[in-house]
Image (cartoon, rainbow, N blue to C red):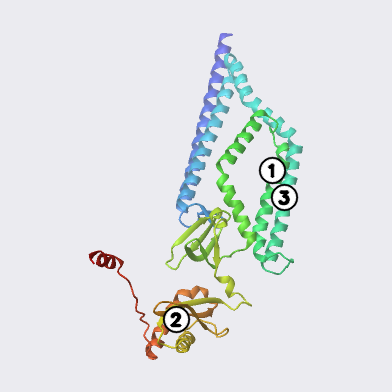
Amino acid sequence: MEGMELLGLMERLGIALAVVAGQALLVRLIWFIFKKISARVKAGAGHKIKPFTIRNLRILTTKQFEEVIFFFLKAAKYFITAVLFFITVPIIFTLFPATEQIAANIFAHILDPLKNLARGAVGHVPNIITIIIILIITKYVIKGLKFFAAQIASERLKLPGFYPDWAWPTFNILRVLLYAFTVAVVYPYLPGSDSRVFQGVSVFVGIIFSLGSSSAIGNLVAGLVITYMRPFKTGDRIQIKDFTGFVVEKSPFVTRLRNIRNEYITFPNLTVLGSEIINYNTSSEDGEAGLILHASITVRYDVPWRDVYDVLIRAAAKTHHIEAAPKPFALQTSLDSSCASYEINVYTKEVEKIRLIYSLLYQNIQDEFRHAGISMVCPQYEADVTKDISAGRGS
């Protein structure tokens, strides 16, 4: 009888050793396979792996993407090894009566959570199907809105009182509102949505968002107001406060200008909304006469004003990048103590060349006054008040 028990024990030990050896060989094979996969990934990383981008926004460089792949390969290798280990130990314990109960307990600890997860997943299948249907409907509604926005932006579809540059901002607003509505509808169907932990996390996230995004929300609302006010558009030459430049970006939160020195100036949309804005491009649109540029000079009273007008008009006529119609015109703006002040006004629609036009206009004014023999030097008379007071005291 003892011999039979010893024989059975030896047989179980042999089976246990065979299981351990088989699992060891299997782990070694798995590690070898992962090593080969890693080597192939590393060999082809230079030309096969591209940077990870989403809508032209680079999330990961090629090197970072490669490191992420290696991390997941390593994690998968160790996970599979751990699973094989947890399977091997209970199998070996079942071979021996003394450890059979331990094996049953280990299997129970492993399988019970899996059974609970399976039961919970089966119980939430109707809710999951409902969520999928809602998400599909939302996706195609957004696609429809995007199609109409593209048609309006390209002016293939025209709506009375609705400008083409409103199309994409309006689409983005509707998309955000639709996403928010979808989250509100889907929320009750999420597993665990009625638990206190889930509700507490939701309240915490809401508080953090409301406290940390007040200025961001203000800039976002200001950006929407600016969009529908239409005080300027991308490419316009505008002045905000003391800064003048071309609008290179209109985002929901900021407005960015580029001045003639290629310096970029960024304004929060709240600042833009609360500031006076001068748009030089609105005068150069179709149907408008153009933007008026003016230059002021002073000339002595011994020069007839009609001669000054003629010289200024000739100088303006020789200036490039100005409009032939309406014609340039001159004005007399003031009568000072020793000189009269004059102003020449010209029209232009090339607002991107304002500084060049001014430079050419000033050059032509100097040339024409020199050719006409008229001096542009105006004498200035100043009284030395201190000297007069000292002289009065001495007398």
Q: Dots 2 and 1: beta carbons under 8 Å?
A: no
Between the residue at mark 2 and the residue at mark 3, the CA separation in whole angstroms equals 59 Å
Element marked by disc 1: helix
N-terminal label among 2 and 3: 3
Q: Which residue lies furthest to the left in this view?
A: 394
Query: Can residue 60 be spotted in the picture?
Result: yes
105 and 267: which is toward the camera:
267
Kindly give the residue lying farthest to the top in the view shown.
1
Of the residues tagged 2 and 1, which is closer to the observer? Answer: 2
Residue type at tag 3: Thr
User: SS class of the residue under badge 2?
Assistant: helix
Q: Where is residue 237 in the image (x, y as percent from the top left)?
A: 52, 68
- The amino acid pointed to by label 2 is Leu
Determine whether, in the image, residue 326 is placed left or right of residue 32. Answer: right
| Residue 80 on image: x %, y % | 54, 35
Kind of residue at disc 1: Val
Which residue, given by chain and number where applicable, does mark 3 sit on?
Answer: 138
Label 3: how many residues lie within 10 Å, few (<14), some (14-19) or many (20+)?
some
Element class at badge 3: helix
Mark 1 = which residue?
A: 183
Residue drawn at 67 percent across, 57 percent down: 171
- Identify the residue under disc 2: 361
**Mark 3 or 1, nearer chain start:** 3
